[in-house]
């Protein structure tokens, strides 16, 4: 039986996947490990590249080709569910490892420290041209305080090794999923950071989180993942005591603006039903801004005084 399952999700990673797989296959261990690659119906040459490498490593690589595009969250959870080993290491198809003893070091740590559920390490961040940006989180070897982990995601996903706890129930409607999973693991065991720099995270234009809060990519992110992002912040607030109400209000405001721009009244209604208290609070506290011609002010007006107009527009659009 394998001791470690390496979980790798891919989508249109033809430029990067060979580097990632070679870094997995270069691992030097005194135990067996498997590589589980879940491809989310890539439209480029990613699958063909994986297949070519797999032919030479049939005993190591398992390739799962999704018949439909699941999206990164569901694809990641699917890949995790297929891992049967004692430990799980994670690395997306556009990242890679730079230490051939990474798995051995982390597995040894978990073997010797049964009260820890997660071990991770520092990672090197580069841009799409391979130029160095920084080391993250740049910690010395130490245990991570739970409160510190709640406040921000200090664990690079390509550096983590989990103890395989099958009893964990994970939601599929939360973004960022990795931070949510780290916190779930932190409730059942301690977390340790190794000072070693053993992986590389690649920042590129398709990276989910590479945007500022006022550019077009931010609004595209909200359109695709806004409700899941609200779910994530709500979990931090309700389950882990993080006071992020102001951020949730701003996010909801921006999300409603995006949905109004797209005439997506169904999503607006879903947001209202899912977060009625926050929704009402936001409306009440921005009531004074109603005078004006911006689309958001217009939205507030209709939501408060003429909600039937929004419903009528939606019904008309569906018919």
Image (spheres, rainbow, N blue to C red):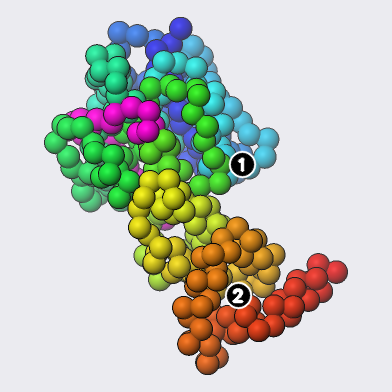
| Left or right: 285 as drawn, with respect to 259 | left
Q: Residue at x 43, y 45 (%)?
A: 239
Of residues 148 and 212, which is closer to you in this image?
Answer: 148
The answer to whether residue 86 shows anywhere in this view is yes
Of residues 317 and 135, which is closer to you in this image?
Answer: 317
Q: Are there few (<14), some (14-19), or many (20+) residues within 10 Å of tag 1?
A: some
Looking at the image, is 285 positioned above or below residue 185?
below
Q: Residue at x 63, y 42 (%)?
A: 69
| Left or right: 26 as drawn, with respect to 194 | right
Range covered by the magenta-colored residues: 185-206
Q: Are there few (<14), some (14-19), or many (20+) residues within 10 Å of tag 2?
A: few
Q: CA distance from mark 1 to mark 2?
A: 26 Å
Residue 70 tag number:
1
Q: Residue at x 40, y 71 (%)?
A: 214
Query: In terms of sequence position, does the residue under pointer 1 or pointer 2 come before the other?
Result: 1
* Image coords of residue 20 (percent x, y): 39, 32
The quarter of the image holding the C terminus is: bottom right
The answer to whether residue 28 shows anywhere in this view is no
Residue 201 inside the magenta-drawn segment: yes
Label 2: which residue?
Answer: 261
Q: Quadrant of residue 209?
A: bottom left
């Amino acid at each position: 039986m394998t001791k470690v399952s390496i979980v790798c999700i891919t989508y249109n990673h033809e430029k990067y996947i060979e580097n990632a797989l070679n870094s997995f296959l270069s691992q030097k261990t005194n135990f067996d490990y498997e590589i589980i690659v879940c491809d989310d119906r890539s439209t480029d040459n990613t699958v063909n590249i994986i297949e070519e490498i797999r032919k030479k490593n049939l005993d190591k690589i398992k390739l799962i080709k999704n018949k439909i595009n699941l999206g990164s969250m569901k694809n990641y959870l699917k890949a995790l569910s297929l891992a049967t080993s004692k430990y799980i290491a994670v690395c997306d198809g556009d990242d890679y490892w730079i230490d051939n003893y990474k798995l051995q070091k982390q597995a040894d740590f978990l073997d010797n420290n049964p009260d820890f559920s997660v071990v991770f390490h520092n990672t090197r961040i580069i841009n799409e041209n391979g130029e160095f940006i920084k080391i993250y989180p740049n910690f010395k070897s130490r245990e991570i305080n739970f409160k510190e982990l709640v406040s921000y995601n200090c664990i690079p996903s390509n550096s983590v090794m989990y103890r395989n706890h099958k009893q964990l129930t994970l939601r599929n409607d939360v973004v960022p999923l990795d931070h949510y999973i780290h916190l779930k693991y932190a409730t059942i065991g301690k977390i340790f950071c190794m000072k070693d720099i053993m992986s590389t995270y690649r920042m590129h234009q398709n990276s989910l989180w590479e945007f500022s809060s006022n550019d077009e990519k931010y609004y595209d992110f909200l359109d695709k993942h806004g409700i899941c992002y609200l779910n994530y912040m709500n979990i931090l607030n309700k389950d882990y005591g993080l006071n992020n109400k102001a951020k949730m209000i701003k996010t909801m405001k921006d999300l409603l603006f995006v949905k109004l721009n797209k005439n997506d009244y169904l999503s607006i209604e879903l947001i209202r039903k899912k977060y009625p208290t926050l929704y009402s609070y936001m409306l009440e506290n921005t009531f004074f801004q109603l005078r004006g011609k911006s689309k958001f002010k217009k939205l507030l007006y209709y939501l408060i005084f003429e909600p039937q107009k929004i419903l009528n527009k939606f019904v008309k659009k569906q018919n």
